[in-house]
Image (spheres, grey):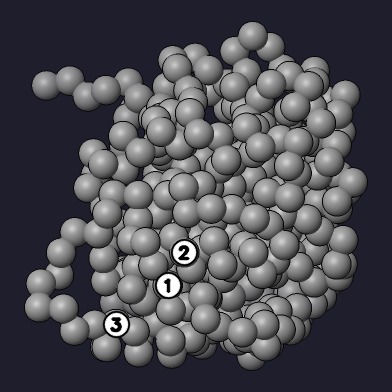
Amino acid sequence: MKLSQKAQRCTLSPMRKFTPYAMAAEAAGKKIYKLNIGQPDIETPPAFFEAVRGFSQKVLAYANSPGAGFMRDAVVDYYHRIGVDYTRDDVLITTGGSEALQILFLCILDEGSEVIVPEPFYSNYTTFIQAAGGVIRPLSTVPEEDYSYAKPALLESLINEKTRAIAIINPQNPTGNVLTREELRAVADVAKKHDLYLICDEVYREFVYDTDDVLCAGSLRDLDDNVVIIDSVSKRFSACGARIGMLISRNKALMAEALKFCQGRLCAATLDQVGAAALYSVGPDYFEKVRAEYRRRRDLCYQKLTAIPGVVCAKPMGAFYAMAKLPIDDADEFTKWMLTDFDDHGETVMCSPANGFYATPGKGKNEVRIAYVLKERDLGRALDLLALGIERYNNR
């Protein structure tokens, strides 16, 4: 029997494809410090669990396909607090930010349509865009320039008759790059000039460490039809397992098409929406504490990485990831070796090889993405293990 070419074009997630080796290592008694996936160890606010425990309906019924009214209202209220005015009709609740991306690309892409994406980028964009029949048109960035991509001339050089959208992640996963207001405006002006969608994945919005000069793309009111926001409770509230995301846009025609897919999958989980809506009652002091914690982890991660001979790393300005070029030949082989052949006192570390974060063939071969989501003591030990592993790997 045949399998679709779309499925075969997709690849396994670089964050998860080495999980079988990790499971085998753990079964053999090794302790693994997992820096491969953005699963924070920050406690989820109690409001989520209190709301779920307080759920008293006798039947756990479907929610409305666009999302429960209370959930959409919670999102609208949150954006109002950060100075962006949306209405309930501008918000669709999805099963995580991942489904929001899937639905969006199904709505805007035909076979062969292109999406300009600064690389390295969140690796699942490859899966979502290819599954919708699209092609990633990569805009390559480098650590020596802090992964900067707000370059109108370069963006315009990638635009052709097949281009449908520019997709950005701000703050950026995996590089930690953060656009200033002026840089966001520069990218937005290109999208407006060429009548393209400007897809802004802002799931790490609260995690910016060295500047206040940032802006939600929803504030760009002259691009009401262009801007599409992808959002989620996963990272903001350390609630990855809740699987509640949002597709947000003032483009009525787009949202009408997206609703078809929302109805086709019936609804996002009702009980998860109950808990997620309660998370939006959390005050600014929560974000201040969490941001300070991640800033400390960022500083430790950057310090440890740049102390390893031969490592190239730009200082992340936001999110909770760092990209690092390692003095090794192949990050895939190194990651596997760290799980199968290496340990120090029964401990090892797991990162994500970076080739899956690029669309340009050959890029990322000796790079890894590190998620600094562990407590400082564990993070420090993990990065010491990485340094020791590099030394032993190269001396095999």
Depth check: 2 or 211 in front? 211
Percent across and percent down for residue 210 are: 86, 70
The residue wearing badge 2 is 73
The residue drawn where x is 59% and y is 22% is: 164
Please tell me whether residue 334 is drawn above or below residue 90 in the rendered image: below
3D distance between C-alphas at marks 2 and 3: 18 Å
Is 66 left or right of 47, judged from the image as shown?
A: left
Q: Earlier in the sequence, mark 2 or mark 1?
A: 2
Q: Quadrant of the N terminus?
A: top left
Q: Earlier in the sequence, mark 2 or mark 3?
A: 3
The answer to whether any part of residue 52 appears in the image is: yes
Point 33% across, 73% down: residue: 274
Question: Can you tell which quarter of the image residue 227 is in?
Answer: top right
Is disc 1 in contact with disc 3, using a CB cutoff of under 8 Å? no
Q: Is residue 43 left or right of residue 184?
A: left
Secondary structure at badge 3 equals: helix
In the image, 254 versus 2, the foreground residue is 254
Which class describes the residues within 10 Å of circle 1: few (<14), some (14-19), or many (20+)?
many
Residue ID for mark 1:
277
Which amino acid type corresponds to the residue marked 1 in the rendered image?
Ala
Q: Position of residue 17 (x, y in %)?
A: 40, 52
Dot 1 or dot 3, earlier in sequence? 3
CA separation, marks 1 and 3?
10 Å
- Kindly check if marks 2 and 1 are in contact, taking CB atoms under 8 A apart as contact: yes
Amino acid type at circle 2 is Asp
| Residue 128 drawn above or below residue 267 | above
Three-letter residue code for mark 3:
Val
Nearer to us in this view, 208 or 144: 208
Residue at mark 3 = 52
